[in-house]
Amino acid sequence: MLKDRAASGHQKYTLAASSLTRVPAHAMRDLCQNAVDEAVFAGAEYVDARVLSRRSQSVSTRNREIDSVSDRETQGVGVRVLVGGAWGFACDRRLSDEGAREAARRAVAFARASASRAHRGVTLAPAAPSTGEYRTPLERHPLDVPLAEKIELCLGAEEAMARDGIEVTQCFVRAQSETRAFASSDGADVLQEFCECGGGIDALALADGRVQTRSYPSSHGGSSAQAGWEYVEGLDLEREAPRVADEALALLRADPCPPGVTTIVIDAEQMQLQVHESVGHPTELDRVYGTEAAYAGTSFLGPDALGSLRYGSELMNVTADATTPGGLGTFAFDDEGVTARREPVVEAGLLRGFLTSRETAARLEHGAGGSMRADGWSRMPLVRMTNLHLEPGEGSLEDLLADVDDGVYMATNKSWSIDDKRLNFQFGTEIAWEIKRGRLGRMLRDATYTGVTPVFWGSLDAVAGRGEWQMHGLTNCGKGQPGQHAHVSHGASPARFRDVQVGVRS
Amino acid sequence: MPGERALELADRARRAAAGDEVDAVAHLEHSAFARFAASTVHQPTLVEDETVTIRVVRDGKLGAVSTNRTDDEGLRDAAARAGEAADGGRADPAFPGLAPPAEVPSVEGYDAETAALTPDEQAERAWTAIEAAPGHGLFGYVTSGVTEIGVASSTGLAVSQAMTDTTAVALVADEGLSGYADATSWKALDVDPAGVARVATDKAERTRGAGQLEPGTYRAVLEPYALGELLWYFGFSSLGALPFLDGRSFLTGRLNEQVFDPQVSIVDDALDPRGLPKAFDFEGVPKQRVAIVEEGVARDVVWDRRTAAQAGRESTGHALSAPAQAIGPIPFNLGLAPGEATRDELVENVANGIYVTRLHYVNIVDTREGVFTGMTRDGTFLIEGGRITRPLVNLRFTTSFGDLASRVLGLSRERKLVNQSDFYGERYPHGALVPAIATEAFTVVGTGSTPGL
């Protein structure tokens, strides 16, 4: 549930019991405002300030013993300024008036050091002053769940994976609570409280020098959602554990995926990563403008591709949605104070939108921002994915398979790589099955597929319907220097692609 | 005294906690980043932070809590929660206890001038790079920082270190061209941002008009940037004790076997002043030089206290901080022994093949077989008749590190310290000392885009 109401007075908002900060909510908002005032006084044309307090907890078990129990809190203030058309950012871990004002002054000084030689000024797309509050709707706060209960859950799931030939089993669960206050010199005044949790299992089978791994619900640290502990319970790790272990063992005896050009059907989990890498990152408008060129890369899309570039077949519909219930990229306001929105990125195969900041939207003269997110208090906000979904089509997975005479069904990402313009990719999955005359046949190991983004999406000829649609949350999307991790969610149904190169090995 | 503040903080934190055993790690960061794109500084970031991780052991049960609230109240809260975490857990039979006191080696790695760089000076260093690359856009960053680590334990262990580091990264890029260079050191004077930008410019100018290449296994020269990237992934997936014991490592079952060409020797040596030196790990255990591969023969992997206890070994000082310790020990100071060739001689040795400057988005396809995939970028060329003749588009490779290192045509006598940190989380500078390599086996499986923007 999103709450977007005018602040009715800072003092009336209280933080959840699981938040650790000793600074009350109204004081967090005041610190933001003090930082903004200080930076304006020091000469900034624009300022935004974030005060953030985060607590994260994780429990992991390995081979039915506790591997790690950890609890981490971090808090501080980050101040971003524009001075003479140049950005500056500084931060301070002290949640005090002194810390906030000092960060503001340092940010202004650092911006001023670049301003005299800035080649290009910065214009920000207009944004209405945001005021409001948001809190993740939840039933049971995951930080209120006793450690002993979390440990029992992990050990129970591991027990269900134990069998001969399984050399390593692992289970982990995580929880995070974050309070984020934001103010800007444009009049924004926002308080948001996020709660997320998740978990996952994996089993490693080993025989004759061959290793195979299966995981659930994904191989990227399980899956997380912005929700209460009920999400972790709903994953039902213990129920899935026997299948995970059995499949890991079966993969040891499976044949390798034969190379060739064929039809592939990809499961919802791998489709989510396909969307992330080949649609999400290339449509980040800062990448289009080259600001990630030296590290994460650029994009094959140019600014003029909007509305004209055919990204894929007419069955391809991708939406950026910062309002999806349970999404890790769900909020009421982004880290520039822009109100959350749901917007098409690709409609019927045509590029319809970019992920934008106020700066990049103004430069394109299209959009209004809404995708700026910072990893904590000590990093500048960057253009990031929020929740990016492949919209469902029609029918079931069985329907997709039924129309394949000879092909491969691939499930659960294992390896991933894509070039710096997000064109040439190679993905591998943990498990695959051959498809013969519309039915799944023998299991295959070490399956990979490769392609070029618009060609691959152009070969999309079926997307399964809403009943097959799943959403998973990733916590490891990297970008920026210094590096930042974003937490993002993706939803997708299984999808079918024709004439794809599979089975690439060295 | 550099490092003293970290030790004082670790000791305060340790004293705030109660348990059968207690230790605390203090991790302090003071850093500046001047990141630029299209020759404009666009992400300038100043970071000040200090984080303490307290571990409490009660009745064989372990709890760990980290906080950056380092006043007395913050430390008391964290210590209390670490105790509660231990009480709420279960005894861990694999936990070997906290590290005993030990004499840590004296290492270099701290430079007072680097530590004293002001934000203005950081910005100025970025501008010297930008001004050295006229005509095209410059992308990259200049950064420097001070990292202090202190470890204090109820066992009597008390160690600390301050490290400085600085890196300049330059990507010169425009439509249809791109070239890359970087430099890393613990001394700012050793890193010339303008010089780095000039090398990148020269490389970029030679990438215009890139041509295609058919997939296949090629002879290749890999510059230190490319080899260092592969070595990082190989180290992460195969050279730590946890994957080795699990059976996931390329080296599992292969110790004392000839796994690579005799020209290949790999060490992890945190004591080498030519790298980014470290005296101890996050358990306070002294760093040891570990010979991993000697003249092509697999000898060892790196260990922390938990994996060492499991295998009846001693820790080599490669533990991560909690909770990352769960992924096992990691070699942060890899080095590959140099050869005797010049860069030109390596190209001559290859005769016909490809020249690779840098890699992008490397990932593990098969850890046991040491197979990796990724793309080349920012300077890929064709070698014909022992000479670099023309630029190539970016290439997708899926190649075995084992094959690459077993069929070696030569190694350069000159080595480079290659930065391997992307600066996620708390700053912990690390990098590898690597030469360029000429190999018979670099497998290209596809082509990507042209160089540049």
Image: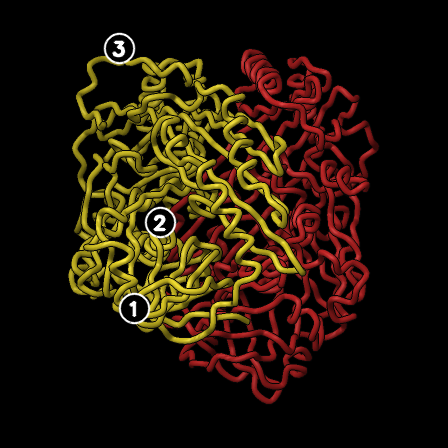
Q: Identity of the amino acid at label 2? A: Ala
Q: Identity of the amino acid at label 3? A: Lys
Quadrant where the image shows the C terminus of chain B:
bottom left
Place of residue B357 in the rendered image (x, y in percent of width and height, measured from the top left): 55, 68
Distance Cα–Cα, label 2 vs label 3:
43 Å
Quadrant where the image shows the N terminus of chain B:
top right
Which label sits on residue A105? none
Dot 3 or dot 1, earlier in sequence: 3
Measuring 53% from the left and 68% from the top, which residue is drawn there? B398
Dot 2 or dot 1, earlier in sequence: 2
Callout 1: chain: A
Chain letter tied to yellow: A
- Whether callout 2 and callout 1 share a subunit is answered yes
Measuring 54% from the left and 41% from the top, which residue is drawn there? A161
Left or right: residue A391 compared with residue A241: left
Residue wearing tag 2: A118
Which label sits on residue A12? 3
Q: What element does badge 1 sit on?
A: loop
Most foreground residue, B331 or A465: A465
Q: What element does badge 2 sit on?
A: loop
Most foreground residue, B140 or B272: B272
Q: Identity of the amino acid at label 1? A: Val
- Whether callout 3 and callout 1 share a subunit is answered yes
Residue wearing tag 1: A404
According to the image, what is the colour scheme of the structure? by chain
Measuring 62% from the left and 76% from the top, which residue is drawn there? B441
Decide: few, some or many residues near mark 3? Use Cα within 10 Å; few <14, some 14-19, many ≥20.
few
Callout 3: chain: A
Chain letter tied to red: B
Vertical comparison of B246 with A80: above or below: below
Distance Cα–Cα, label 3 vs label 1:
60 Å
Callout 2: chain: A
